[in-house]
Image: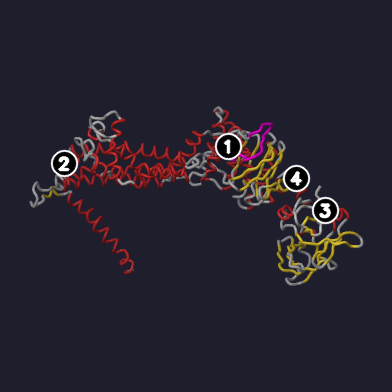
Amino acid sequence: MARVAFDHVTKRFGDVVAVDDLTLEIADKEFLVLLGPSGCGKSTALRMIAGLDDPTEGTISIGDEIVNDVEPRDRDVAMVFQTYALYPHMTVRRNVEFPLKSRNVPHEERTRLVEDAAETLGLTDLLDRKPAQLSGGQRQRVALARAIVRRPQAFLMDEPLSNLDAKLRVQTRADLIELQAQLQTTVVYVTHDQVEAMTMGNRIAIIAKGALQQVGPPQDVYERPANLFVAGFIGTPPMNIIGAKVVQEADGLAVSVPGARVPLPAELAHAVAARNLEKVAVGVRPEHLLLAPDGFVPATVTVVESLGHERNIACRLDDGTLVITRQDMDDPRPTVGETLRLTTEPEFLHVFDADTGERVDAP
Amino acid sequence: MMLGYALVLPSLLVFGTFIFYPFVKNFWLALYRTPPFPNLPRSWVGLSQYRSVLTSQLFTNSFRVTVEFVVLTVPLGIALGLALAVLAHQRLRGISVFRTIFSSTVVTSVAVASLISLTLLNPQIGLLNYWLGRTGSLSPLDDPKWALVAVAGVTIWQNLGLSFIIMSAGLQAVPDDLLEAARVDGAGTWSRFRNVTLPMLSPTLFFATIVGSILAFHSFGQIDLLTQGGPADHTNVLVYAIYKTVFQENNDGKAAVLAIALFAITLVLTMVQLRLLERRVSYER
């Protein structure tokens, strides 16, 4: 049980910067999710904690020790691979036992620990099978058992659910959260699936192009995305982003979006004025964009998707910008081609600097 | 239907002429005793020729020499190929140069390899002979005690490139994440090799053992060029014995029986391979 910290860590593969000046501290017993699109460097960051890749610059510490020069075997971390990486020629028992054997744990203790881990993960009946005889979910549990069996200081998980079918994934997500609560261990969890990140993490660290974009509790990240990338990445469907000009109105600043002018609440107006911006990107979550007869923005319906409990309605604004809004199933279904009017409340507006992509009212 | 036959006809003719006909004819030859002088009629002896040939000193000696030759060449050849492959698998600067060097003997013909070895082992000027402290005395190739070992050494060297390539391909098929998992699990270099690499290589090792054994049982070129089966039949492997029986003794009946014995050995090895392949030595992931 220990904290894990990146201190100005950069990793280059030749000319490619995989991880760019990452500074991040993962608290003891925390469940931290590294979230980002494929190729963003999140797996490299995880592999550097494990010691499978060495940082080009900066230091990584586990507990109070800087581990840059420590061999993977001496770092006392366990890793669950996306492919599970089970040893195909060994039975489940020998797979789970392998980390203990490598550390010369005596035979009796080994047997006891293996059986404990197997029981925790419901593998007791499968101990004498080989990985090829197991289902995907069972293999995944064997990989977990192999990780927990020696009670490491931290668990590293690299997209452990991505090879499971959708139903099993939801179940396993819950199981993993329970397991972490039970084991009271630090977990660093890599995924590209924002639903996993939102549901599992104590905190989410969002990475793009090797650089940390934002870190914080899931709800904070959802409610106050630090930049346009995070705003577009977190949430399904993603936040609507509309390009807008800043205009001076009689009663304060407003943004001019296609077909309308939207006054900014005082706090946002202040932030925009402080940055002296002319162009901004205005963001509104689909659930905050409402259809209303007296709405101030006209939009033409292009696609109506029924999800069973609600509808997603895709519309185009006058300048062609695509926006998505949600609607209850009880409301009348709009027809494609129909022109609707959209509205939102000022407090649901997110305003970003159009050039840098940064949130204007970021602390 | 007719078109299908027409399309396979060319290869059927070639196979028929050079493989199927000689194969059947060989069994027929084995049933007749070859006359002591040409142009005399063959005499039908049935299966009795099998007994006389298979119990003859020629066959038992050749069989023993061949088995010794296989035992000397195959395991060591595979082990050396694997060792080189493991070395070349390291991510080091300029390693591809070594890969090329290691696999170079694949494009070396038996004749060239044998000539080089003959020079190296020459009693007067051979460098290897000098290093072995044998300058001026017999070449190992002429020494009854060492001839087979020397031929085996040349064979191992000549086959090393192929062995290296097969083992390299096998190593490349070992998934990286298994080795990385073993590293995180605490396994050292040797433990990773023994517990992960070697088991994952077992299909390759098995394949190389069987194919290598079959090839070794069929060795001819290097024997012909290096020792001609001598000294005193110490390197007279089965194929060479067949060759001498046909072309020096002109006894095709006897040679046919020897060839059938070699066929039986190859058949058994092939069947073992097929049987074990069915039982999957390989691992599903």
| Residue extent of the magenta highlight | A53-67
Q: Which residue is mark 3?
A: A275
Circle 4 chain: A
Q: Quadrant of the N terminus of chain B?
A: bottom left
CA separation in Å, label 2 and label 3: 106 Å
Residue B265 horizontal/vertical position (percent): 28, 44
Disc 1 marks a residue whose amino acid type is Val
* Earlier-in-chain disc, 1 versus 2: 2
Disc 2 marks a residue whose amino acid type is Ser
Q: Which residue is mark 2?
A: B52
Q: Is residue A68 visible?
A: yes
Label 2 or label 3, whichever lies nearer to me, is 3
Looking at the image, residue A318 sits to the left or right of residue A110; the answer is right
Circle 2 chain: B
CA separation in Å, label 1 and label 4: 29 Å
Circle 3 chain: A
Label 1 or label 2, whichever lies nearer to me, is 1
Q: Are marks 2 and 3 on the same chain?
A: no
Q: Which residue is mark 4?
A: A216
Looking at the image, residue B166 sits to the left or right of residue B110; the answer is right
CA separation in Å, label 4 and label 2: 89 Å
Q: Which residue is mark 1?
A: B184
